[in-house]
Amino acid sequence: MIYVDVSAAVHSRAGLGRYSERLARALRAAKGERIALFYNQGKGAQPPAALLPFSRRSVSLGYKPWRMAVLMGHLSHVRFNPLVPDAELFHSTEHLLLPLRRVPTVLTVHDLIYKLYPEYHKRLNYWYLNLAMPLFCRRASGIIAVSEATKADVVEHYEVAPEKVHVVYEAAADHFRPPKVEEIAQVREKYALPEQFLLHLSTIEPRKNLERLLEALQIARRDFPDLHLMLVGSKGWLYEDFFARIERENLGEVVRPLGWVPDAELPAVIAAANLAVQPSLYEGFGLPILEEMASGQVVAASNSSSHPEVGGEAAAYFAPTDVEEMAAVIGRLLRDEGEYRERRRLGLEQAQKFSWERAARETWEVYEKLL
């Protein structure tokens, strides 16, 4: 059996969870029952319903105890083979590599945020990842990076041979498509969406650069006084200062967090906006850009890390630390109907270049090389 670790999908609806679930489903569709699941069950959590038919093995430990157990297994050369006794290959889809003997292992590296932006991580997470990830990258038989930008970071900072790192892009799920007019009307009513708003899609955390987006919004509102900002996504960590600033600057009526929105409604919420803005300082891949483009939305994005790989010629870019430039790009797209229509067309084309079928095929090619 080839095991795919879907712990992230069991415990999170954020980016890593979406990645592990969708990759596992695409691999299963391509290779059938040869694909099995492994996950840390924690306190009785279960995989998403779409993954329940899979053969699976699990452990039942809390998040932190399991992470420490895996790291100590590596440091003390204790192997975890009894947990997956029939494994031909093991694929860790998050930054946690099972220590196994005589079993090829694949590690997906999503980003090196903890290394490049340590101030944006909690202290314990920073300590753990900076200790563990160099070790995991050395021990893995092969590494999958979700972008060329992430591959370059891994090769540079961990001195990994470039040929060991394989770039396999993520993709938007199939349900991200331009919604019908009535679907948009339904979410407008359900979420009380304003007539004119920017949309930001991501977990709320410091590297998302949302404080500068607040500044750019206030500049843009000089010309578009009815412009609002809707934040779609769960709270991550170190977000307290951001929300304190919203309150301090009396922006509570202008900026509104919608929290987690069900997948089925997300394309309509995206399409209801006037513009999507992704100002992140650093992204390993930047999946929201593809999800927004596939939903028929125009995207303004920072020109940092992997964003230009994902957005191609369809996105309009700005320097993430230049608030005036960010506001200018937002204003230009809201004014220029011709550019807006063209970028929408290009965005739909760009999103179609990525698919989970392709991701599964390229991931399987990595498996075959190791097997």
Image: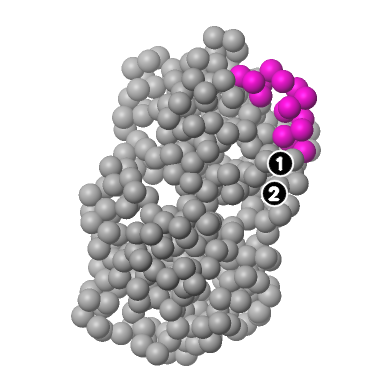
What number is the disc on residue 351?
2
Q: Mainly helix, strand or loop, the magenta region? A: helix
Does 333 lie within the magenta span? yes
Secondary structure of the residue carrying numbered label 1: helix
Q: Please say if the residues under marks 1 and 2 sit with CB atoms less than 8 Å apart.
A: yes
Tell me where residue 332 appears, x and y as whole percent. 64, 20
Q: Residue at x 52, y 23 (%)?
A: 325
Q: Residue at x 53, y 38 (%)?
A: 303
Image quadrant assignment for residue 265: top right
Q: Amino acid at mark 1?
A: Gly
Magenta-highlighted residues: 331-345
Tell me where residue 14 appears, x and y as whole percent. 48, 51
Q: Amino acid at mark 2?
A: Ala
Secondary structure of the residue carrying numbered label 2: helix
Which residue is disc 1 drawn over?
Answer: 347
Left-right relation of 17 to 70: right
Rendered position, 96 above or below 192: below
Kindly tell me whether residue 321 is visible in this rendering. Answer: yes
